[in-house]
Amino acid sequence: LDLDAVSEVIRRNMGQIRFCYEQGLQLDPSIGGRVGVNFTIGGDGMVKIADVGNSTMNVQQVEQCILLRLRSWKFPLPSGGVDVKVSYPFSFKRTGQG
């Protein structure tokens, strides 16, 4: 599976990820950081497994929201119908600070 194709699906769905972060900001306006997500795209293009690999944000509500959204995305079909493992870092910082 082409990395650019995976990145394109992520880019198209970034609004959902930003929504998760914005929900977290309502609870704690100071949050920010990086959430590294590991996920596996199955032969059907759907996410089979997704979990947080590492996080400097450490806000479970935001992390779980990201995983929930990610599991609903459809990726291009991997060639040969094999599972593809992906690690992707999402970085968050408030805009308009200072």
Image (cartoon, rainbow, N blue to C red):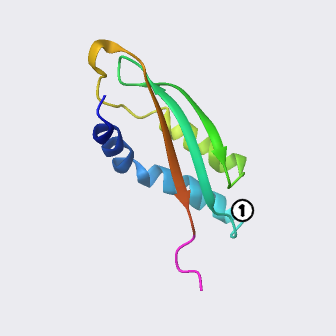
Against 76, residue 57 (above or below) is: below
Residue 96 at what x, y percent from top left? 53, 80
Residue drawn 50% across the image and 57% down it: 18
Quadrant of the image for the N terminus? Answer: top left
Q: In which quarter of the image is residue 28?
A: bottom right
Residue 44 at what x, y percent from top left? 35, 18
Q: Is residue 70 left or right of residue 61?
A: left
Q: Label 1 belongs to which residue? A: 27
Residue drawn 66% across the image and 64% down it: 26
Against 79, residue 7 (above or below) is: below
- Is residue 36 highlighted in magenta? no
- Element on which disc 1 rests: helix
Against 2, residue 92 (above or below) is: below
Question: How many other residues sit within 10 Å of disc 1, few (<14), some (14-19) or many (≥20)?
Answer: few
Residue drawn 54% across the image and 57% down it: 91
Which residue is nearer to you in this view: 62 or 86? 86
Q: Main secondary structure of the magenta part?
A: loop
Q: Quadrant of residue 36?
A: top right
Please tell me how many numbered marks the rendered image carries: 1
In the rendered image, the residue lying farthest to the bottom is 98
User: Magenta span covers which residues?
Assistant: 94-98
User: Hey, what amino acid is under mark 1?
Assistant: Leu
Residue 42 at what x, y percent from top left? 41, 19
Quadrant of the image for the C terminus? Answer: bottom right
Residue 39 at what x, y percent from top left? 51, 31
Residue drawn 52% across the image and 74% down it: 95
Which residue is nearer to you in this view: 72 or 81? 81
